[in-house]
Image (cartoon, grey):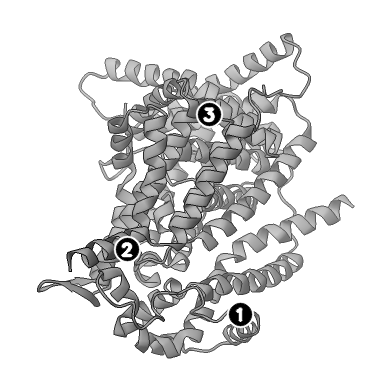
Amino acid sequence: MNKLGENLVDIGYMDTLAAGDSPLHRLDPRAKIFTTFLFLVAVVSFNKYEVSALVPFFLYPVFLIFAGELPAGYLAGKILVVAPFAILVGIFNPVLDRQILFHIGSLGISGGWISFLSILMRFVLTVSAALALLSITGINSICEALARSGVPRPFVVQLLFLNRYIFSLTGESERMSRARSLRSCSHKAMNFGIFTQIAGHLLLRTFDRAERVYQAMLCRGFDGHIRVVRYSRIGRREIAFMLVWAVLFVVFRFVNISLILGQTVTGLLK
Amino acid sequence: MHMADALLSPAVGGAMWVVSGGLVAYSAKKVREEADDRKIPLMGVLGAFIFAAQMINFTIPGTGSSGHMGGGMILAILLGPYASFLVLASVLTVQALFFADGGLLALGCNIINMGFFTSFVAYPLIYKKIMGCGHDKKRLLLAATVAGVVGLQFGAFGVVLETVSSGISELPFKAFVLLMLPIHLAIGLVEGLVTSGVVSFVMAARPEILTAAAERTPLGVSVKSAVLGIAAAAVLIGVALSWFASANPDGLEWAMLRTYGKEELETKGKVHDLLASLQKKTAFLPDYDFKKVGTDPEAGTNTGEVKVEAAPVRKAAWPAVDVGTSVAGLVGGSLTLVMALLAGFGLKRRKVAS
């Protein structure tokens, strides 16, 4: 099983997390999605040399992780797994942008390092918020929220089906590749010709399964419409959640709290 | 080649969200019009097939290194452009949610880069044209490979355009293109081989699956209306994007000035002049309106961030701002050629329907 396969195992775990029962879990999914989007837009709207003003934004993912009783270490590991692309592209900044912007003692810090640091911070903020959102909401509730906010029904149904069958089909493909490796003791890697045959068989089984699923749906009275169950509604708590965070994001975006804090502290020292 | 939130500006991310959202809605409408109930579970299960098949590693012929398939083109061949676009969008959404692959804001970019170019460019305009309705295996190999390569090249180019026009990364356009395109040429070739291998397997085992798919008519595209749509939308969105860039002086133009130098930026063309003049007319906000710290002479006191704003470089870059902003518009404009293509398709479809 490759890395992707290991990642897929995670989906099961994330679903377990989403089944938790904290006040955050009980919020209407629409409120959580809306707030997280506000957060993402606020974070990426800073100029590329901004570092200090980004810091207060850590409050949001940290709040989600703690109030939602999520395992912080596990999420941190997941963030590291997806880090390479942002780092790979970001690392060119220090190389290309060597304009010295300020000095710490005798050490000159170039603009490139600042913007690289900024990219890393954006990365951690956006990824941790997205993962926390899923872990306190779950894919089914997200689909429910999407359907209720006007996302086209075929797309929502597609997401629900996809989520449902990922497990069965990855299990199928895992069994097929295990069977192959047991029968070819000396050849560790799968050659290309074998792969297309295995993938082809998997595809045929997929078609058969789709047909069986369709028959089963018909047996249960499927009439061309998939109904998405509604669990929650936007109440006082949802509005309070969105409002408080929206105000905080606006304040964080336009007032550099870290800077003010730094100036107050250095002012006091003088 | 997932685009990441950390490298994206809100203007680019938002624009791509709007475009991909429109495409999802349009495709959903098309799929609903087909009214094929059987397709509902089939699409869902094929999406899961993509994940399952991506789990299997194989050795890439001639290199010895291992890789896995992408699968977008297989979906397009089996389901046609609209349904395969929806399936790919759902796969990318699950990747963004569960693996944080890409990100939520970058999801729009990723759906365009990987879904749109595969389903609406490479499949109807290349694969279908070469393949026709026949069952010839050599033809299939050629069609799948060319379509795979072209689709991935467009996708990789999309990543470059989105990154450069966001202005967070310092990577210059040329270098980034030279980095991304050759890599994705190789990936595209492998992807083409996989596609033709799997499809020819299905062709031999269960030809009826493919016959049904092949008889679907490809997208009707009139060159004239497409070009008109592209031109109009590119100018409009380019101006809008350069307005965003001008409201945020630390973003694109600075990056452009640093990576290219002034000389190259002053090359003039008709489109360039047009965009520049339009931009002057429409940018009613003064350029440094949003910048509060840098314009305050007393601000340069203690911390590094303040000095960033007050650094002398800013003064040197200042007089050339207009050129930089309109280059932003130009980049944004070419980026949105893609979105415009869609508008052309949409118009054409509506005409046919009415």
Mark 1 belongs to which amino acid?
A: Ala
Mark 2 belongs to which amino acid?
A: Leu
Q: In this view, does B150 lie above or below A180?
A: below
**Which numbered circle lies on residue A259?**
2
**Which numbered circle lies on residue A139?**
3
Tell me if residue B138 can be seen: no
> Helix, strand or loop at disc 3?
helix
On the same chain, marks 2 and 3? The answer is yes
Q: Mark 3, chain letter? A: A
**Which numbered circle lies on residue A55?**
none
On the same chain, marks 2 and 1? The answer is no
Q: Is residue A261 above or below residue A16?
A: below
Q: Mark 1, chain letter? A: B
Q: Which of marks 2 and 1 is in front?
A: 2
Q: Distance between the residues labelled 3 and 1?
A: 42 Å
Q: How far apart are marks 2 and 1 (CA)?
A: 31 Å
Residue labelled with disc 1: B283
Residue closest to the eye, A133 or B174: A133
Between disc 2 and disc 3, whose residue precedes?
Answer: 3
